[in-house]
């Protein structure tokens, strides 16, 4: 396993970027941003407040979202949270020195809820574009709750074997005729419980800093439990950061205390699509 890594929402380049949705080739006259769900929503939390862009009905079905960071800036991860994309959607990342970049730098793997692309090397660009083609969507629009771009903080912490990664469906249920349950799904989210056992307290300090920066759950972060694998989501601490001190390495006290803890993170809920 690789190390635990994260990108805080407050460190995302997108929060201060200029964002537009425009087809650089002029082929689409029919894709627009819903005035009730503007582009500003993909820059800001909560994830449940999305941007909606209509999918073109012409033979070319891509939509394009362009970001201007104001200057060439380093980043090594791009994440799309709270999306409604189908599993057959194609998500391509372009970057360059112009507002409509044409240099392909990555193709994102689709995952439910939060899709992300982690680059092997740091990229440095002013302009970034996300091209989405979801011709087989069940919807007439692309919905995006949040886009995050930035530099991952990779810790020295490695989760222990036996960590838990679950999917939770949140439903509303009423009793119908003859007490038959009638359920409606609101959203589905991920939950991870990450065990760290016998970790030097000094190595755990970065996790404490993250907890304090997020003030437990006032803001989310892109959480990668294992930075070498494709697990990840935009979420928050679910509980207080209570750790135990079973023993020290040399028995000399605080200088070599070992920490054990199991930390639950929960994904920010996807938008409820009506």
Image: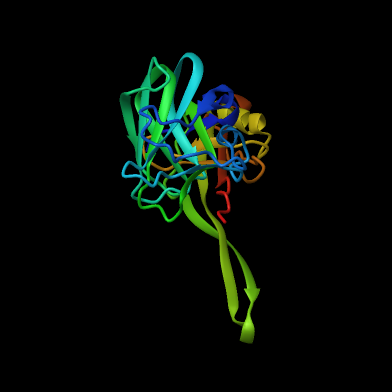
Q: Is residue 164 above or below residue 200?
A: below
Point 45% across, 30% down: residue: 22
Frontmost residue, 140 versus 184: 140
Q: Nearer the viewer, residue 203 or 192?
A: 192
Nearest the camera: 6 or 198?
6
Residue 61 appears in the picture as rendered:
yes
The residue sitting at 43% across, 56% down in the picture is: 138
**In which quadrant will I find the N terminus?**
top left
Q: Residue 52: where, in percent of width, then height? A: 53, 43
Can you give x and y, in whole percent of width and height, for residue 120 in the image?
33, 26
Check the image and report above or below for 186 versus 181: above
Q: Is residue 255 above or below residue 160?
A: above
**Position of residue 150 measured from the top left corner of the image (x, y, whole percent):** 48, 25
Residue 154 visible in the snapshot: no
Image spot of residue 135 (x, y percent): 35, 48
Which quadrant is the C terminus positioned in? bottom right
């Amino acid at each position: 396993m690789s190390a635990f890594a994260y990108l805080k929402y407050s460190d995302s380049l997108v929060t201060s970027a200029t964002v537009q949705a425009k087809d650089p080739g002029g082929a689409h006259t029919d894709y627009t941003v819903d005035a009730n769900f503007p582009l500003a929503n993909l820059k800001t939390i909560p994830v449940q407040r999305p941007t909606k862009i209509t999918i073109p009905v012409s033979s070319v079905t891509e939509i394009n979202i362009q970001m201007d960071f104001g200057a060439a800036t380093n980043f090594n991860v791009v994440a799309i949270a709270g999306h409604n994309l189908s599993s057959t959607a194609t998500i391509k990342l372009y970057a360059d020195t112009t507002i409509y970049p044409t240099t392909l730098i990555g193709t994102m793997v689709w995952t439910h809820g939060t899709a992300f692309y982690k680059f092997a090397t740091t990229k440095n660009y002013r302009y970034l574009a996300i091209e989405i083609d979801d011709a087989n969507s069940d919807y007439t629009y692309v919905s995006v709750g949040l886009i995050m771009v930035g530099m991952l903080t990779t810790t020295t912490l490695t989760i222990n074997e036996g960590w838990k990664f679950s999917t939770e469906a949140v439903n509303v249920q009423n009793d119908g005729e003859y007490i038959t349950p009638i359920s409606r799904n609101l959203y589905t989210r991920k939950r991870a419980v990450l065990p760290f056992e016998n970790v030097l307290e000094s190595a755990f300090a970065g996790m404490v800093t993250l907890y304090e920066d997020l003030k437990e759950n006032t803001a989310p972060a892109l959480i990668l439990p294992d930075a070498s694998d494709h697990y990840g989501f935009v979420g928050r601490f679910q509980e207080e950061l209570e750790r135990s001190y079973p023993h020290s390495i040399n028995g000399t006290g605080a200088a070599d205390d070992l920490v054990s803890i199991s930390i639950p993170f929960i994904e920010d809920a996807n938008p409820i699509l009506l």
